[in-house]
Amino acid sequence: MLEVLRNLASIGNKWEDKTTEDQIENSGSNLRHEETHTGGQPYECQQCGEASSSLPGVQRHMITHSGEKLYECKQDGRTFISQTSLQKHRITHTGSAHFKCKVCGKDFAYPRLLRIHQKTHTGEKPYECKQCGKAFATSSDLKRHGITHTGEKPYKCQQCGKAFGRSGDLRTHGRTHTGEKPYVCKQCGKAFARSFDLRIHGRTHTGEKPYVCKQCGKAFATSRQLHTHGRIHTGEKPYVCKQCGKAFARSFDLRIHGRTHTGEKPYECKQCGKAFASSSYLQIHGRTHTGEKPYECKQCGKAFASSSHLQIHGRTHTGEKPYECKQCGKAFASSSHLQIHGRTHTRKKPFGCQQCGKTFASSRHLRIHGRMHTGEKPYECEQCGKAFTVAYYLQIHKRTHTGERPYDCKQCGKAFARSGDLHIHERTHSGEKPYVCKQCGKSFATSRQLHKHGRTHTGEKPYECKQCGKAFAMSHQLNRHGRTHTGEKPYKCKQCGKAFTRSPYLHSHEQTHTGEKP
């Protein structure tokens, strides 16, 4: 080590005629002062070329290449490359620090660290990057940032070859190989590889969220979360999938999305074997087994398995629909609903049924359709026992018992149990028929009517009687036909009691009592 110091002392021509040992002893104070005038960094690492304004600084830096750790903690045996690092570590044992921030009460081992910290309150950032203009609170932060321009990564992991711009990052990375997690939470015992991660984790206990969005007031535990959140306002999505061009606000989301192309699903449920692309999806899925719904709406009490579902639900109360279709202007409460809606413009239906080949715009619609083949109806009415393939259908059905019709037509006052029925009804006033048959030009008020009409051209009859094999184009035609086998006549005349299989037959019969001529 003395040999290294002798070599370093000869660099920069800043020494008087003293012994090398004298020069080393005085270097710390004299050259730090000179650097304030010259801005120079006369000491350079012989291995990677990194420069420092002080001899101790480059001395500590060179140890990162050798892996040597000179300073040992007598309490737990951990070793450090500098006296400063050791003293900072000792605070974790003693719990005492000499320098306290008057603004937030945070403790520091050295006045220099306190001064740097105080800049987080004042907002002072005196160190500016000459290349991009970005400003920083400390010279070391500016220096680290400079690596983003040069791309330089002089610190290489000897185990896996991964390279880093900072020695500290290499040291932290090494723990992924050793499994070392020296930073332990005193409240819950969870351990971390980095002190920064422990500090952030601590906020889950305190609830502290010091980073506030200036646009919407939402608060976050880390500056990184705030920065990512800001992209919701700016619309910035810097992470683009090279395969399909889809863009994301977070690199993590791009990584998860990439698995839709590779088919990779590394997270498997131990109970049912279902696999997922991300650990969070597996965690949410696990609640389908436990029934856990930890996220409750404060307005109506409805509970959800995930926070995102609660957030989307909250918009049913506020009426907020932040996702707008650029083609038609229609707005939605969630990005997934907008994405599905977008397929009505592109006619894209990427989800195909393996049994009948029918395609759908969303995986949910395919899943619901699959129940037509399996006969599964998991949603049962507690009052009458009628079962449904979709929870929404059960919700609508319950209104037949309660008589609830919450959707009123503003023009005629007619009320409906479903918002979709109201929307279709409104077309009777406007005369709008947006669904046009490409073969004959006939137009319809609903896509369902157009779909049924299409069968007059194709001859398709998907509804088959299980008793006689006769097929029909419409489900209600099959239902009506079924009565020829059962003898059921649900439409009864109130005057004479005669019953009929169809309502038009009853209507014609009633005219024989009134004398009305059809």
Image (spheres, rainbow, N blue to C red):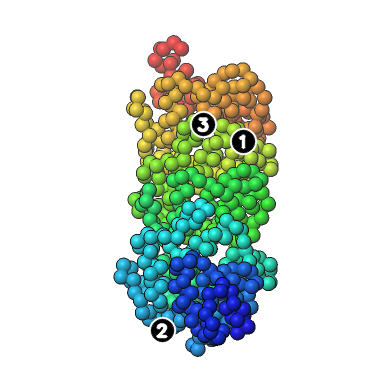
Dot 2 surroundings within 10 Å: few (below 14), some, or many (20 or more)? few
Of residues 389 and 478, the one drawn nearer to the viewer in this rendering: 389
Q: Residue at x 50, y 34 (%)?
A: 326
Residue 501 in view: no
Establish if 145 lies above or below 239.
Answer: below
Residue 81's label in the rendered image is none
Position of residue 506 measured from the top left corner of the image (x, y, whole percent)? 47, 22
Of residues 266 and 197, the one drawn nearer to the viewer in this rendering: 197
How many numbered markers are drawn? 3
User: Which residue type does callout 2 highlight?
Assistant: Thr
Query: In the rendered image, which residue does mark 2 sit on?
Result: 94
Position of residue 394 measured from the top left corner of the image (x, y, whole percent)? 47, 43
Q: Quadrant of the N terminus?
A: bottom right
Between the C-alphas of marks 3 and 1, the distance is: 15 Å
Of the numbered discs 2 and 3, the one sitting upstream in the chain is 2
Position of residue 281 measured from the top left corner of the image (x, y, whole percent)? 55, 56
Mark 2 element type: helix
Establish if 439 lies above or below 148.
Answer: above
Q: Residue at x 47, y 22 (%)?
A: 432
User: Which residue type does callout 3 highlight?
Assistant: Gln
The reply to whether callout 1 and callout 2 are in contact (CB within 8 Å) is no
Mark 1 element type: loop
Query: In the rendered image, which residue does mark 1 sit on?
Result: 348
Of the numbered discs 3 and 1, the one sitting upstream in the chain is 3
Of the numbered discs 1 and 2, the one sitting upstream in the chain is 2
Residue at the bottom extreme of this rendering: 74
Between the C-alphas of marks 2 and 3, the distance is: 63 Å
Q: Residue at x 56, y 54 (%)?
A: 251
Q: Is residue 285 left or right of residue 123?
A: right
Query: In the rendered image, which residue does mark 3 sit on?
Result: 327
User: Which residue type does callout 1 highlight?
Assistant: Lys
